[in-house]
Image (cartoon, rainbow, N blue to C red):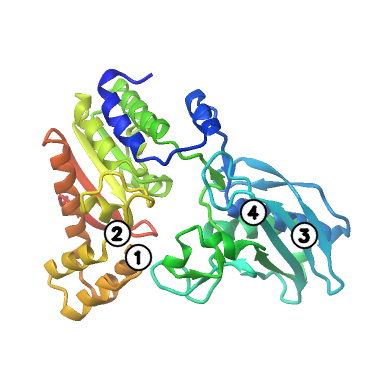
Amino acid sequence: MFIAKDKENLEQLAEQEQSLPPQIEEKKRRRTLRSGYTTGSTATAATKGALYALITGKPIEQVTVSLPKGGEAMFNIAYTKSEKNGKVTCAAIKDGGDDPDATHGAEICSTVSFNKNAGHINIDGGKGVGRVTKPGLGLEIGKAAINPTPIKMLERAVHEVASHQLQNQGVDIVLSVPKGGEIAMKTDNPRLGIIGGISILGTTGIVLPYSTASFAASIRQGLDVATAMGADTVVLTTGGRSEDFAKALFKLPDHCFIQMGDFAGYSIKQCANNGSIRQAIIAGFIGKLTKMAMGIKQTHVAGSHVDMEFMARLAAECEAQPNVVEEISNANTARHVSEIIKKNKIVSFYDHVCKKVYEQMHEHAKGQLEIEVILYEFEGTIIGRHPKK
């Protein structure tokens, strides 16, 4: 139950959420929204099914997938097709739970076969899996849009099923999504330069249904627990990955770490209103932190976009050359900007982003909170910080 001072903030957050079908609203009210699984998990299930059929010569109806953060999930195999050329294709159906996900219900297929390159696992995308055509996505241009965590899940699945075969053979995996091209038009993929289909995504393997009120409530509850445990410092992260990096840096109890997700403004205001929180440390990556630096307090992709002209102005303030400023203004993503900054060795840029975030959040907290901002490289290196330690 929310206390009175939360009501206005939560109502303002709820106004930013798209209207949902009545049955979903009822599930939200009852807090019974159903989680689902990522395209990465679904592709792994299809791959496992195809490998079992390839090795045994018999189709399998269900498979168990190991999830990146631990635990397992059971998937049904929709169908199995064996070809005369030694290939087997299986399909699994993407179940996004109650999340409003464009890929929900999509048929995710995996075609597997053995090759003569012992121990090697080759993973590629076929029809309906997008190809990367622009920089800034952390994926190689020209390659299939299959993110690192799903790659690891697929490799693990191969070792679980075909460890004996890998001693003498390699495995080829081609993922496909029959309606992926159509589905991709409902996503940001075309704008980001992922052409021809969807991305195979997922860092945890699980899709949590998006709910503004429940997310805000979890932030508030996290702060309540932290203060009840006597903490006066909290670390606000934009997600699980930045939280892992922050935990390696700050030797604080687990209850001091709170995932604020997209709700930076709400989280800072709640810290300031808490009365017991003295310091809030904000930790994240270039995209979300740039939005905070712009003054955006709710950073969900549906409600805001990184302004490349803003990032170009920051670079100019760091005395970047005019041609670099122009290149940044035409960049594809915040990550692309980061690549340009690194290439041109504009070392003060990231600290400058952090300083802008600090100024926005300090003002939002009405000066009632000590704030520190940390910007991570995607591999976990600290590349920006304010104030400097």
Q: CA distance from mark 1 to mark 3?
A: 37 Å
Q: CA distance from mark 4 to mark 1?
A: 27 Å
Q: Which quadrant of the structure image shows residue 64?
A: top right
Q: CA distance from mark 4 to mark 3?
A: 21 Å
The answer to whether residue 360 of the structure is visible from this angle is yes
Q: Which quadrant of the structure image shows residue 328?
A: bottom left
Q: Which mark is first along the chain, 1 or 4?
A: 4
Q: Which mark is first along the chain, 4 or 2?
A: 4
Please report the residue visible at 31 percent of the width from the left and 20 percent of the height from the top.
228
Q: CA distance from mark 3 to mark 2?
A: 42 Å
Please indicate whether residue 359 sits to the left or right of residue 172 in the image.
left
Q: Secondary structure at mark 4?
A: loop
User: Is 334 above or below relative to 93?
Assistant: below
Q: Position of residue 21 (x, y in %)?
A: 52, 36
Identify residue for label 2: 306
Please report the residue visible at 87 percent of the width from the left and 72 percent of the height from the top.
84
